Image: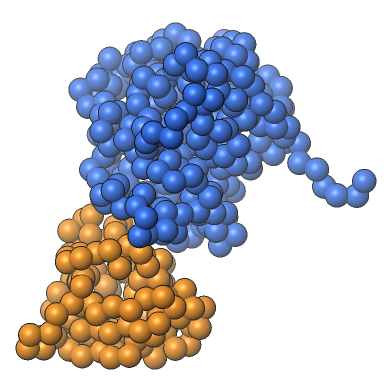
Amino acid sequence: LKKSDGDVTGAFIKIPALLERHPALITRGRFLEVECLLGSTEQSFHISIRSGRITDMTPAPVLMRSWRFAYRATPQAWTAFWQPMPKAGWHDLLALSKRGAAVLEGDIQPFLTHLQYFKDLLALPRRSGGVS
Amino acid sequence: MTGYIEPMVGRYVHVEIDGAPNRIYFEEAGTGIPLVCLHTAGSDGRQWRHLLADKEFTRHFRIIAFDMPWHGKSNPPANWNGEEYRLTTERYTQTILAFCHALALEKPVVMGCSIGGRIVLNLAIAHASDFRALIGLEAADFQAPWYDTEWLNRPDIHGGEVCAALVSGLIAPQSPAPQRMETLWAYKQGGPGVFKGDLYFYRVDGDLRGRVEAIDTRVCPLFLLTGEYDFSCMPEDTLRTASSIDGADITIMEQLGHFPMSENPEQFRRYIAPVLNQIRQQQKI
């Protein structure tokens, strides 16, 4: 891993703890139960969410583990997305996918049902300083 | 009476559109050049409330914002039988012309945002001589889709939540939190399938590529303003559109997204004031 890739991975690892500090976001996701794959194109994580809380986060790949949907962006995209004031076109998960810097795959029904939850969840590292 | 009362007044006008009676809600403030404002897809005329409350603009313009049928306080037409709502270029154009006619507006200025910006281009193509000036916010002849509109109206996903969450990314990060939340609130309140139905015009029926070349800005001046954070109608979409229109006046607005008038009214004012001033000056010639 390059340094920036490692920084992005390090930021992802902190997301479950950051989520615990945002009870309103957990409440927003209270009906969410899903297995998904989130992360960078270099290192993604199998994430289990139960009642809005991340109950397990394991680096991929895990042999024969399935997921409903995956959202993966390049390390450069996450770095730009987590800037305190992101530049235009790098400021939203779907802006990243439109420009081809992120890929959304699988059965995206739970992602869209809880879209604001996932937008806020994956923006948590921005509020805690992001990555340089 | 101690409460602050805002200057705009809201009323209903009965308008026949496509042979059916419609009860259209509109708000207005000011006197002078009529300026009709068109809201974005899936929202309503409240988006323009800051413009309607602007003491300087309303000294020179009669600013009018109406809710499209199916939106805000304008119900569906009386003959609606529950079938899926779909906005077409023809119906949208008819609605605007019929509304302006019903209020007997003489050569109004029309300013529209998003789908309102797209239809402004169609007005410039097909009805330029009816208008004093046209202003398209977040307007382009076409833009690449970034999601499938089928997700906007289905029983297993809350329509208001998904519509608001989708468009939340189109608001610039610099926009103040109260204005951001208010802009999204209108999306949470929209009727089922209305945002999707509006986007039928935007995505399917209203592709104006190859047609905007016909716009003659000597007949009716055209102003196009797009926010830098709008990744739906991107600045390059507006610039590409404008490159085919001789005399179009283009502005890329910093620190603004897809909803300039509602997401950050103060920042938007910096850009729209010179445009409105230019229209006033042209009036004097």
B130 is higher (above) or lower (below) than A30: above
Estimate the x, y position of residue B38 in percent, counting from the top left.
Answer: 50, 31
What residue lies at 24% left-to-right and 20% top-to-bottom? B211
Q: Position of residue A7 (x, y in %)?
A: 25, 85
How did the renderer colour the structure? by chain
Q: Is residue B129 left or right of residue B29?
A: left
- Residue at position x 50%, y 35% in the image: B70
Task: Single out the residue that lies furthest toward the left.
Answer: A63
Q: Residue A123: horizontal and vertical position, in percent?
A: 37, 73
The picture quadrant where one finds residue A71 is: bottom left
Q: Can you give x and y, in whole percent of width and height, for residue B161 in the image?
A: 44, 59
User: Can residue B255 be seen in this snapshot?
Assistant: no
- On the question of residue B161 being in view, the answer is yes
Left or right of residue A37, residue B60 in this image: right
**Quadrant hosting residue A56:** bottom left
Above or below, comparing residue B120 to residue B186 in the picture: above
How many numbered discs, if any?
0
Q: Residue furthest front?
A: B81
- Between B259 and B14, the residue placed more toward the observer is B14
Snapshot quadrant of residue A45: bottom left
A84 and B67: which one is in front? B67
Chain letter, blue: B
Report the residue at 48% width, 87% height from top: A21
Lateral position of residue B203 relative to residue A66, left or right? right
Chain A image colour: orange
Q: Residue at x 53, y 57 (%)?
A: B180
Q: Nearer the viewer, residue B162 or B179?
A: B162
Screen quadrant of the C terminus of chain B: top right
